[in-house]
Amino acid sequence: MQPTLQQLRLCRSVLFLPASNPRAIEKARTLPADLIILDLEDAVKEEDKATARAAAVEATHHGFPGKLVAIRVNADIGHHFGDDAVAVRGSAADFVVLPKAETAKRIGDAHSLSQKPVLAMIETAAGVLAAREIARHSQALIAGTNDLAYDLGLPPGADRSGMSLALQSILLAARAQGIAAFDGVFNGLDDAAGLEAECQAGRALGFDGKTLIHPNQIETANRIFGPSVGEIAAAERLIAAATGGAERHEGRMIEAMHVAQAEAILAKARR
């Protein structure tokens, strides 16, 4: 059964792992990540591309219980893309991830070759400017913040203030089409406070979840992008109190939109 857009919107943690690493693949089956992306692109050496491709397809057929699964192919500007996308067609992956998406045509090509719904990575200035059109043909947008920072010319190690407009543009494009949007990765593997702060900032912007590069980051993403105990209790009280139309609840005015928001919080809590 093909995953629904709503299932993607419930994903809090999106873990990239190299398809060339069998130990990482096996471990991922036991991890609490919501979406696993088997990577054929940046994480895989050139000489390992073919074996990683075969390993990714095989891994999807063994399954990842309770998780959505995607395969990230190499960008369509390179010579591996065609072989990758055709291989994904024979996999049991739920999605294909297209890096460096810049046009709707590229999304169409990835879908046509793989026969899988496309998760589009926005990693360049051109991709940001085309995000609205890309979103029309995708199931989710992923902010590729490392490449985006490079393409924008941001200084190494700079904070994300220089790409705030780009991040908001990605989110706006996704929301205009009613699809999921995922924040970019955090590179500091030993910086727990930095990861926490960036997850908080991403959630405050409105992202559904965060892409991750290490299993140790999953708990933080799940906790921050999932509703807190207080948020769950407040949502339950609001739904129980609502009778329709605009009305007063716990010192503020609520209406149908607030009920829908509370129901979304409870749906994510159940996830």
Image (spheres, grey):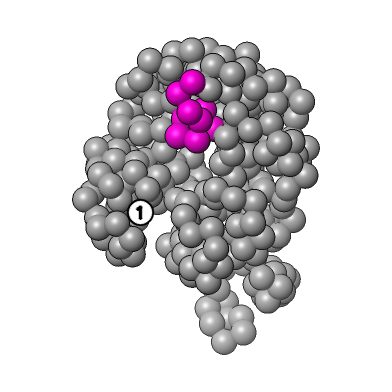
Most common SS among magenta residues: loop
Judge left or right: residue 110 versus residue 22.
left
Which stretch appears magenta? 39-47
Which residue is pictured at 35% across the width and 32% down the height? 101
For residue 247, above or below residue 211: below
Question: In this view of the protein, which residue sits in the foreground, 91 or 27?
Answer: 27
Q: Which residue is mark 1?
A: 167
Q: Position of residue 123 (x, y in %)?
A: 34, 41
Q: Position of residue 211 (x, y in %)?
A: 52, 49
In the image as oriented, which residue stretches furthest toward the left?
153
- Identify the image quadrant of the N terminus: top right
Judge left or right: residue 80 versus residue 270.
left
Which residue is pictured at 25% across the width and 44% down the height? 151
Specify the quadrant of the image occupied by residue 36. Answer: top right
Question: In this view of the protein, which residue sits in the foreground, 13 or 268?
Answer: 13
For residue 256, above or below residue 79: below
- Can residue 233 be seen at all in this image of the molecule? yes
For residue 94, above or below residue 146: above
Specify the quadrant of the image occupied by residue 28. Answer: top right
Q: Position of residue 227 (x, y in %)?
A: 64, 65
Q: Position of residue 148 (x, y in %)?
A: 31, 46
- Can residue 114 be seen at all in this image of the molecule? no
In the image as oriented, which residue stretches furthest toward the front?
47
**Kind of element beneath mark 1:** helix
Pointer 1 local density, CA inside 10 Å: few below 14, some 14–19, many at least 20: many
Three-letter amino acid code at the position of disc 1: Leu
Residue 129 located within the stretch drawn in magenta: no
Which residue is pictured at 56% across the width and 67% down the height? 192
Residue 43 located within the stretch drawn in magenta: yes
Question: In this view of the protein, which residue sits in the foreground, 93 or 81?
Answer: 81
